[in-house]
Image (spheres, helix red, strand yellow):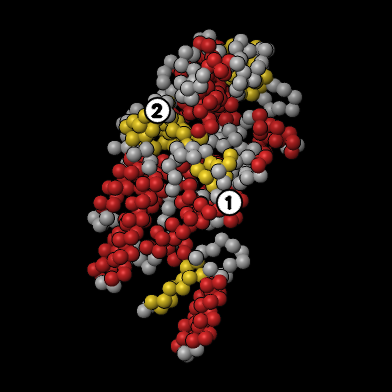
Amino acid sequence: MLTIYNNLTRKKELLEPIEGNKVGMYVCGVTTYDLCHIGHGRTFLSFDVISRYIRFRGFDLNYVRNITDIDDKIINRANENSEPFDELTKRYIAEMHQDFAALGMLPPDQEPRATEHIDGIISIIEKLINNGAAYEVNGDVYYRVSQFPNYCCLSRQDITQLKSGARVDIDESKEDSLDFALWKSVKPNEPFWKSPWGEGRPGWHIECSAMSMALLGETFDIHGGGSDLQFPHHDNEIAQSEAATGKQYAKTWIHTGMVQVDKEKMSKSLNNFFTIREVLERYDWESIRFFLVNAHYRSQLNYSADNIDAAHSALERLYTALRGLKLNEECSEAGIDYEARFIAAMDDDFNSPEAIAVLFELAKEINQLKATGEEADQIQAIELGTRLKRLGYPLGLLQQDAEVWLQSGSSDDELSAETINALIDERTQARADKNWARGDEIRDQLTEAGVILEDSATGTSWRRG
């Protein structure tokens, strides 16, 4: 049975959908004003695995991941560039899709944009004003935090400290320093929409409430995002949504851990800020994905060149087990015990490190069977290899052709596969001609280029080291 750590209750709970077998999951998406960084990669790849696995377990998932296409950062960047805000967001939405696809992420079922839900946003704000949970001041509308007794029930922030102004901006137009904007009156050089309170635009927090409830209902199963969103964003979502509907907003809250770079917080000021695109220029996408998946989604993750290299080496071991196997389209009963252990690990709050450990045990048995040369063992290896590939899918791993992956390179100065194969053919001929010196010379040349040769009775295969 699938259990998930609920950040709202601080304990693991059984996934029991509100409606039959259907699971509704909303994840706060990207604010589209710049390229996505490796921290985005970690968060959304984690939810890619979570969504894959929920479906793997037989649930009917509706995965909604929004796009924030209007907010202060977008407006500021658009003004800096002297371009319309919607042209800026259109460009970076396309870049985001490209980067996420490059990491093997599947698209969400629905991808709403804030600007498509202005009417719904206004409707919720009107409800909040009518029931006394919000108030209008000179065209701005604020949420009245004092009327919501469970404020900060998610992050469990100390309200007393927050009132001191430690983490909120002081604004004399607000009744309370904790009150937050639901609607912002129009300012020069800003886009705007018409509302009952005048021209303006929505606040960030209300956007997610409107989009999630429009697509998943007033109460839904799972809400997710990065751990940095717990306060104020998710606390504010809960407060405004539950004040508007009188119902619980989301049953389960999932948050991913942050990424550090060489054990320091990632930031542009420290010059250790990496976009997904920059990382993909240095490493193959599946090694990056393995690195990100091979840590529990709630843990803090340290990005470093050494850790990516280690991920590549580990992935190489798994693909080597699959190499040379003509896999079946469907699994037999072989390896069902491995699948049971894989499921037990992933059922425990998506424990991907434990699940990956099972994959390595499975790969080890495959290699042992391949080494015997016995026909029955080769058949068994194929059946277990088919199981290994099946179990890789929920993690988004091992779906490439093993030979292609093992021979793929990531650097422009590496020898091409065609050149390597030609040199191997030349070496084979040299050895047949007993020209051992030339054969050794070619092996040394390939070794220096990071190419590992593996001679066998059936010929020579190769992979990049």
Q: Secondary structure at mark 1?
A: helix
Looking at the image, tell me whether mark 2 or mark 1 is earlier in sequence order: 2
In this view, 216 is above or below 274? above
Q: Position of residue 192 (x, y in %)?
A: 67, 25
Q: Report the amino acid beneath label 1.
A: Val
Give the label on residue 204, or none.
none
Residue 176 visible in image: yes
Q: Residues within 10 Å of mark 2 (few under 14, many from 20)?
A: few
Badge 2 is on which residue?
Answer: 10
Q: Position of residue 344 (x, y in %)?
A: 30, 43
Q: Residues within 10 Å of mark 1 (few under 14, many from 20)?
A: some
Tell me how far mark 2 sits from mark 1, CA to CA. Answer: 34 Å
Asked if residue 353 lies left or right of residue 288, the reply is left
Residue farthest to the bottom? 433
Residue farthest to the front? 263
Q: How many marks?
A: 2
Q: Residue at x 51, y 28 (%)?
A: 230
Asked if residue 1 lies left or right of residue 160, the reply is left
In this view, 401 is above or below 10? below
Q: Quadrant of residue 232?
A: top right
Q: Residue at x 54, y 81 (%)?
A: 441
Badge 1 is on which residue?
Answer: 279
Q: Position of residue 26 (x, y in %)?
A: 46, 32
Q: Secondary structure at mark 2?
A: loop
Residue sitting nearer the eye, 361 or 4: 361
Q: Residue at x 51, y 75 (%)?
A: 421
